[in-house]
Image (spheres, helix red, strand yellow):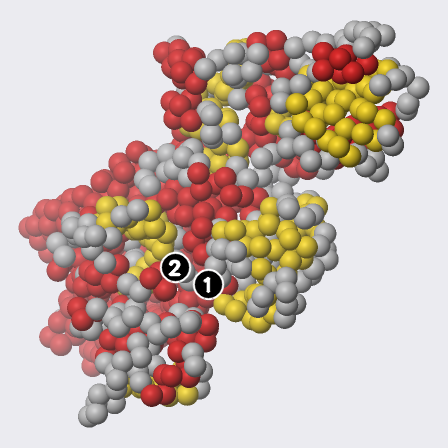
Amino acid sequence: MNAASQASEACFHCGLPLPTKIDYRVTIEGKERPMCCPGCAAVAETIIGAGLTDYYRDRETFSPKPDEELVGLPNELAAYDLPELQNTFVHRTENTAEAALMLEGIRCAACVWLIERHLKQLPGALEANINYATRRMRIRWDTEQIKLSRILEAIAKIGYRASPFDPAKAETARRLERRQAIKRLALAALGMMQVMMLAVPVYLAPDGDIEPDHLQLLHWASLLITAPVLLISAREFFVGAWRGIVNRRLGMDVPIALGISAAFAASTWNTITARGEVFFDSATMFVFLLLTARFLEQEARARSGDALERLTGVLPEHCQRFDEYPTSRSTHTVASAWLNNGDYLFIGTGERFPADGIVVEGTSETDESLVTGESRPVAKHEDDEIIAGSINVGSPLVIRATAVGMQNTVAQITRLLDRALGEKPQIAQLADRAASWFVIGLLIVTAFTAIYWWQTDPARMLPIVIALLVITCPCALGLATPAALTTAAHRLVRMGLLPSRGHAIETLAQVTDIVFDKTGTLTLGTPAIAQVTLLGKVNEAEVIAIASGLEASSKHPLGKTLRAAAAQPREAIELTTYPGAGIQGTIDKTIYRIGTLAFVRDLVCTDPPAEPQTDASCTVVALGNEQGWLAFFHFTDMLRPESREVVAALQAMNKTVHILSGDSPGMVSHIAAEAGITHNNGGATPEQKLDYIRALQAKGAVVAMVGDGINDAPSLGGAEVSIAMGSGTDIAQSAADMVLISGNLGIIPPALKVAKTTRSVIRQNLRWALAYNLVAIPLAALGLVTPWVASVGMSLSSLIVVANALRLARSNKNSTVERVKK
């Protein structure tokens, strides 16, 4: 009897006896299930709410009873400390854990500052970084000091809501937020039009033409129409302002709320006393304009965040798992979140892979474009690696899962990208500090302006103060950097280059020298047959077939290359491996040897008819039998197809290109000549590689190092920006600033252009935000700007910053990477 069937006799969640007088129930799969306490009920409701009902269907034992301290938490927080639930969104490393959370309620850069600062004061909270443009937060904590539920509770206590990032929930929340924004905007638009209809006659009629009673009636009608606009449409400004005041953090909502309140309060007083001017039209107009700006900004942010959310939501929710492979071919549907390493999965044509794995049965092709940026289908055979999130576009496959949950490739890419977007480069930190003091300075300037105009011309004081409060825009400062970095990062990910550090894009734009490792970077890293020299009467296809038969069980890279080159390998018996020399075997009762010249000479007993033509770039393997010499195989590490074009493109961009390798100087010089690189250094140890980079830096160079991320670790760490060659399972091990997911070097030149353009856009945004406020504040303080014009200016300021950043999303169809793919 499994846990599910026993649940009817006890608590469905933990299995403990049910209390006699208290009845807690949760509806699971259409049935009411009994719970023993509020804690179990809260945990069950959260699991069901997260769309993880399969957890109860697939579990082998009852779930642990929640800690007593969780019972007092809100229901939606109670389950987030369960390991079973955390497996779906938390990445653990020893005593620390890391998660990506979705935030609700953020309205300006000040909100970001407040949450980050509040969380960093919690004991055990190690890092808290928020991307303003995407509303995603990366939080890292010490699991021995604090629990995730307490972090979520701390966020809730300051007026925000955080939950594990889930693409479906994020989309639902976005749609709900959009519907609410449209409703508020529609009410504000209706109110503004009605109030303007009442205000226009007052503006157009000469003084005294409208009877005082009729004028008063128009004012009262305007008040009644404006009140619901402020109470409903403008509510978010007042809530945000109050939250900032309570938490001693003055955000952009404070001056907006003050401006709206001042206009409405003064207009209401003047209406009641029947004297003075009213500003109901201005109040409703700038509520409408501000809401319009925020709605358009929200839509723009959604566009900039689409790439990351598509990547996050790429894994299928369910998959087909074999019950007892290979003894049984029966499968059943399980939630992808509950897979384990070693599970055997059936992936049909057109289905996405839910985990990283190894092909066990079948031959097919996969589309890895969303994950690696590579558009061409990749052939897959038995023992080939599978990347989670890719699509099976050929025949059905059976795979063995090797990395599930938060360990698969998609989770690793998303985690690194979250880290990059959360970490703030120096220019963003400077903008955040400026924005944090901006509102305080604005309120001080407003106070002095009010005093001056009260003494100079009291009738003009109120509209000037309202205009001054509304026209300023620290939001543009707060958006300037994250909007550009987020858009650029998503474009780079689509190309196949993953930024994993916050400074990477900014630093890449300043690079002067690019240093490449050789093996596995500029070259393919696997030996290829460059030439076959025939020494007897046997043709080339036959000598390759013989060599392949001798190498049938060899693990050596050269043996693998020979096996791959043979159309029909010959069958060899009595195979014997001689370490460091070669392999001997029998084919059709004839003894053959493959290996070094000396090893084969001992069997043939004569010198070869001609010595092999060798240089430092080749490795030569001999083949012979008892009757004589058969062939020399020349192996070389081939340049990547795109290497020459990439080097030429970089040199055209005035970048100095270097090769730095531990291989022999002759081999390195040969590859450098082939690639068109003049600066090369071979035979270098890891320490010498680091010294080489430091010597370049001492001359003023900004260095980017491109390597495989394993034996190049010191030099990658020493460069200003490091780019690691990445593929699937290697991504998690990379500590580089950027990871070349697809392994295509053709991405690097256009990536440099994107980085340079991004840096330019950030500077444009910051200059615009600064120039706008330097001009707008004096104009408003001097009384040269009306309140409604101020609201238009403030709205346009944020929109211009976001629109400028979105220019980075445009693809460059003539880039090097596109030409290489073609």
The answer to whether 95 appears left or right of 653 in the picture is left
Q: Above or below — where is 437 with respect to 11?
A: above
In the picture, the disc for residue 87 is 2
The answer to whether 627 appears left or right of 711 in the picture is right
Residue 643 in view (yes/no): no
Q: Quadrant location of the C terminus?
A: top right
Q: Position of residue 205 (x, y in %)?
A: 31, 69
Q: Residue at x 57, y 44 (%)?
A: 372
| Residue tagged 1 | 337
Q: Residue at x 45, y 50 (%)?
A: 407
Q: Is the Cβ of the residue at disc 1 closer than 8 Å to that at disc 2? A: yes
Q: Badge 1 local density, few (<14 within 10 Å), some, or many (20+)?
A: many
Give the structural element (helix, strand or loop) at label 2: loop
Camera-side residue: 769 or 263? 769
Q: Above or below — where is 575 with respect to 42?
A: above
Q: Earlier in the sequence, mark 1 or mark 2?
A: 2
Q: Position of residue 350 (x, y in %)?
A: 67, 61
How many numbered tags mark residues here? 2
Q: Badge 2 local density, few (<14 within 10 Å), some, or many (20+)?
A: some
Q: Residue at x 52, y 16 (%)?
A: 662
The answer to whether 558 appears left or right of 769 in the picture is right
Residue 101 lies in quadrant: bottom left
Residue 521 lies in quadrant: top right
Amino acid at pointer 1:
Ala
Q: Position of residue 37 (x, y in %)?
A: 23, 81
Residue 558 lies in quadrant: top right
Q: Above or below — where is 650 with respect to 598?
A: below
Q: Residue at x 58, y 71 (%)?
A: 332
The answer to whether 660 appears left or right of 779 in the picture is right
Q: Position of residue 524 (x, y in %)?
A: 63, 28
Camera-side residue: 729 or 700? 729
